Image (cartoon, rainbow, N blue to C red):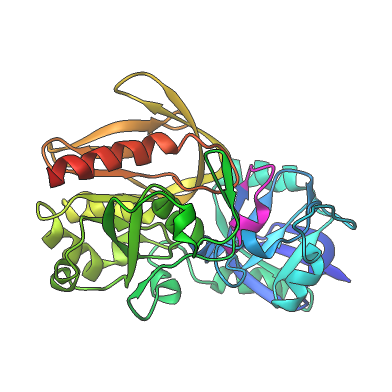
Amino acid sequence: MKAILALEDGTIFEGSSIGATGTATGEVCFNTAVAGYQELITNPASRGLIPVMTYPLIGNYGIADMDNESDRPQTNALVVTELARLHSNWNSTEDMGSWMSRHGMVGIAGVDCRAITTHIRDNGSMRGCVTTELSEEEAVATAKAAQTLAGSNLVKEVTTGNTYMWEGDSRAWKLPNKTVGDMTNYSELPAAIGKMVVYDFGVARSTLATLRRHGFECTVVPADTPAESVLALQPDAVFLSDGPGDAAVLTAPVAEIAKLTGKLPIAGMGIGHQVLALAFGGKTSKLKFGHHGANQPVKDERIGHVLITTQNESFTVEASSLPAELEVIQTNMNDNTVAALRHKTLPIYTVQYQAADIAGPKEYDSYYTEITKMIQAAKA
């Protein structure tokens, strides 16, 4: 079946429908990851996006239930050059096309993703419409009328409605010299070294699993949880999760995080990193085409070491807006934007990238080593 991708500037790409039929809108961005498509699609931080996958063949290892970052697809649609007809993976439970159809996810294949990427790189991310049912003119109009990512509060769509203790899932997690098949079996995990309250701005399962693997018991709370309620739980630290949309509209969470500064160690990533900066009076702004992929180079300014990171961000913290007590300790080498912040006197450390045990580079461990030392020092 024919499908089209229409951008708000009137550019049209024609291809074939994959997944469900229908119409979907969102911000079109390009993603340079070679693997990890399932983690990307099911990550709540991807809500509102239509990723264009630059790797030419997607779906070749199918869908494995244990690799889901949430219980459903989160991206609004998907654009690929080619969707694999056959898949091969011992963990696979379903082919990608069937999985997309079952979840009502619209997609398009058979388009020149290199041309789309070049167009976005030159002109910036823009709203788009993927459709199997609208004319080109209708699709462009629909794209123009779609919600913009800037100013959008997508966190309210993905945050938990209730506080809960995370007890793991059935995903297999590799530990030193051992593979754990069931995260509820805590005897297979390191002994807990502390209690972490996780603000759920769209937390991925891998983030919770990574925190638990590093010894933290995680209590997950809604994004608008008052600081007093967090303190009543008597945690050793607070973690601000990644999530979708524009942090600048999260005025209530920003105010509550501001109340926690100086009372507890705070760590975080992605939109959580931006919320922390906002809590100190900083500002955020929209990136031209964002950081989306598993090969984003980040330089640690303290030691000159370069990390290769996984990122899925559309906004950045403006370095010039930060108060003197917040230090930029890492920068993105592609555009020199802020990649990590640390407070000069308080136990606070946040990163822009996705520091979790997901598909992609594994250099995030240094972050967890540092925040663990930070939290332990604060407890001493």
Left or right of 193, for residue 109: right
Q: Quadrant of residue 39?
A: bottom right
Q: Residue at x 26, y 54 (%)?
A: 194
Q: Residue at x 12, y 36 (%)?
A: 324
* Location of the C terminus (image quadrant): top left
Horizontal and vertical percent position of residue 354: 46, 47
- Regarding residue 193, the answer to whether it shows in the image is yes
Q: Is residue 200 magenta?
A: no
Q: Nearer the viewer, residue 353 or 278?
A: 353
Q: Is residue 39 magenta?
A: yes
Seen in the picture, residue 335 relative to 74 is either above or below; the reply is above
Q: Quadrant of residue 332?
A: top left
Left or right of 230, for residue 147: right
Q: Nearer the viewer, residue 53 or 142?
A: 53
Q: Quadrant of residue 109?
A: bottom right
* Location of the N terminus (image quadrant): bottom right
Horizontal and vertical percent position of residue 265: 19, 50
Q: Nearer the viewer, residue 96 or 233?
A: 233
Horizontal and vertical percent position of residue 366: 39, 34
- All told, the count of numbered labels is 0
Horizontal and vertical percent position of residue 85: 90, 58
Seen in the picture, residue 349 relative to 336 is either above or below; the reply is below
| Residue ranking furthest to the front | 187
Q: Nearer the viewer, residue 71 or 168?
A: 168
| Residue ranking furthest to the top | 304
- Regarding residue 321, the answer to whether it shows in the image is no
Residue range of the region highlighted in magenta in the rendering: 31-42
Q: Residue at x 31, y 70 (%)?
A: 223
